[in-house]
Image (cartoon, helix red, strand yellow):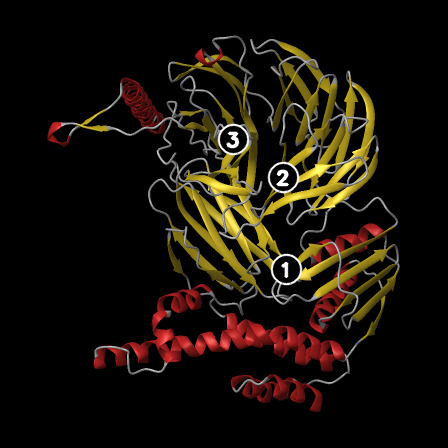
Amino acid sequence: NSNHHCSIVPLQVGVTSQKSMRLLPALGKKATQKVEFVLLTHHSLLLLSVKRLSFQPVFKTLPGQKICRMDLGGALGTPREKIFVCSGSQVRGFTKKGKQFLTFEANLTESINAMYVSGADLFVCASYIYNHYCDCKDQDYFLSGDKINDITCVSSEKLPHLTPVLACQDRVLRVLQGSTLAYDIEVPGPPSVLELYNKDAGEEVLYGTTDGRLGLVQIGEHSAVAKWEIDNDNKKGGILCADAYDIVGDGVNDILVGRDDGTVQVYGFDSSNEPTLRFEHVLSESVTSIQGGCVGKESYDEVVTATYTGWVTGLTTESQKTEAAAGDEFRMSKETQSKVEALRAELEQLQGKVLQGREQYQQTTQSSTAVSAVPVFSINDKFTLCQDDASYSLTLEVQTAIDNLLLQSDVPIDLLDVDKNSAVVSFSECDPEQPNGNFLLATYRCQANTTRLELKVRSIEGQYGTLQAYITPRLQPKTCQVRQYQIKPLSLHQRTHSIDPARPMNRLSLVGQFSFAEIHSWVVFCLPEVPEKTPAEDDITFYFRNTFLGTQLEATYCKGEGHFQSDNISTISILSDVLSKEATKKKINLNISYDINDDSVSHTLRMIHPKLEYQLLLAKKVQLVDALRELQVHEGNASFLIPEYRSILDESASLLEEYKKQPAHLERLYGMITDLFIDKFKFKGQNVKTKVSSLLEILDNYDLNSLLEFFNDV
């Protein structure tokens, strides 16, 4: 139905985390007359009932330590209406009347960030640690190789036990049996959320990733089967929450998805059992929780969402069309009128509170004992590498309107255009030659009521440092928070699960008096997506892929020894320089050896070739656009042009837009070829910087064979 609208009067409860809202199961014949929600803000647990389209509080806990996750439980075979919340390493249980019946201290060194409850079984995860308790007694323990983002458990007749599934940051779902890893499943992105496709029983697990992909896997005892995957072709936000609910009413569970760019989606299944997008709606904030249920009106299903700042809204399947009356006036239904009146009353009440608060603040500032307190505000930020266009996406979300944002970088980075971003950007002059010089100073002035900003930056490998964001909200007195993001030496590399052994590889080997923890910290410093915790094993191997060029890297290291292999000489050169520098800081003497494969240079140039050829052609077409447009105006039409030029004119808008979105793309490719040229001869002990001008001349009249000859003839 295209007429989805709010089914309940929207309510704001406070800043929420992922998976912070659940509908309690409906009981009895008059179940839809009163629907109860459990809501989790950062510091309180609320239970609300919905009656006659408005919220009525049932209970609220006192503010305390930050609460990060919630789940519903109950004795097996009974409705899941017991509420479990975790804060720090403590788990508390509440009845739906607000009575606390459980306080359990898990005694973990880190805070619990994921939890699943089934009968007497409690499954909790901290950053890297999984623990299973039964009747609050310790059962199983597992140390994950990378950060755990979520957990669910699968039960069915085909499985002998309740089977935990962990969503881990290294693009893997880990399936456990007791305290051991049964097997793992590779997924196309870092999984952020897990949800059972059938809540009662079944082996199918739904996963969503931080880069916006969605998939379903069937969990078996010894292996899993990937049922389907949906790519994020439309570049929507990362998935924060999902639910399986039959919203269409065809007897098959649909999939409800909430994303960090505010997109709410409903996927149904076609005749071939493939997921298809049925409905999409965009909210102004990231969607932290999503549920399907019958809330506002009996016999009409709704999609209920909670957003980052705590707005709870519902999208109903009931048609909301208004009826036209004489004189072009519209008649609203009584329900809609009551919703509007309730909203107006709430708005007036809030305006009165704001006015009263302002007056009190003014009086306080004028008194002799005035104390100006800095207002505290919450920021939800994400800095992630996008594999599709080899850029970093910086998303900032604030619980109140943003006034301005200052971006400052001490390394060269390019700002890329983002369609969703309506803020006005201005650049300040920088002097990188200064001791603490900046390469970038950019200010974003936001429009009124902007609470979310999305930016894209592209870094240069080998240039590393810090990007800082200074966020100033529209609050009095003026205050600012600073967030820092590390640009790593090999910033465009992404973790992968395997590499192509047939490629010509260059090798860097290190031997020295360093511990496993020390060399691991150096690898963390150099490369993104490496877990900060030192692996529990004696040695480790990581694989990486360069998202810009497609070249690869293998890193294998242990105490006193490290080996790095790549088909790109420049990657080896950057690693050699940075690792030497880090070892020198610790006064560790390194014995470094290289095994350079000359074939790898022509292999890398061939990998760059299609990208360079495309960018040169794009630049050439863009240069022709203005001249062709003038000719068209002069002649009155474009019929006299050859087909090639006519197609350039037809595509001129998209060509110019693409060129604008990729600033310095050509220069970036030229820079990579120049670095490759210098690095090839650096390992041979030759300095060829004087010949760079000749190389640039060849690039200006680019031909792959001429370039390969130049590299071989020097």
At 39% from the left and 36% from the top, the residue drawn is 475
Residue type at mark 2: give it.
Answer: Tyr
Query: From what the image shows, is residue 471 above or below residue 93?
Result: below
Q: Position of residue 461 (x, y in %)?
A: 63, 65
Q: What label does residue 273 carry, if any?
A: none
Q: 149 and 29: which one is in front?
A: 29
Crowding at dot 2, Cα within 10 Å, few <14 / some 14-19 / many 20+, comes out as: many
Residue type at mark 1: give it.
Answer: Ser
Q: Answer left or right for 55 relative to 195.
A: left
Contact flag, marks 3 and 1 (Cβ < 8 Å) = no
Q: Nearer the viewer, mark 3 or mark 1?
A: 3
Residue 419 makes an appearance in the image: yes
Q: CA distance from mark 3 to mark 2?
A: 14 Å
Q: Earlier in the sequence, mark 3 or mark 2?
A: 2
Describe the element under mark 3 as helix, strand or loop: strand
Q: Position of residue 148 (x, y in %)?
A: 70, 38
Q: Which residue is mark 1?
A: 491
Q: Earlier in the sequence, mark 3 or mark 1?
A: 3
The extreme front residue here reads: 271
Q: Which residue is mark 3?
A: 290
Query: From what the image shows, is residue 276 above or below residue 19?
Result: below
Describe the element under mark 2 as helix, strand or loop: strand
Q: Answer left or right for 403 relative to 42.
A: left
Q: Position of residue 153 (x, y in %)?
A: 71, 29
Q: Which residue is mark 2?
A: 207
Residue type at mark 3: give it.
Answer: Ile
Give the total number of marks visible in the rendering.
3
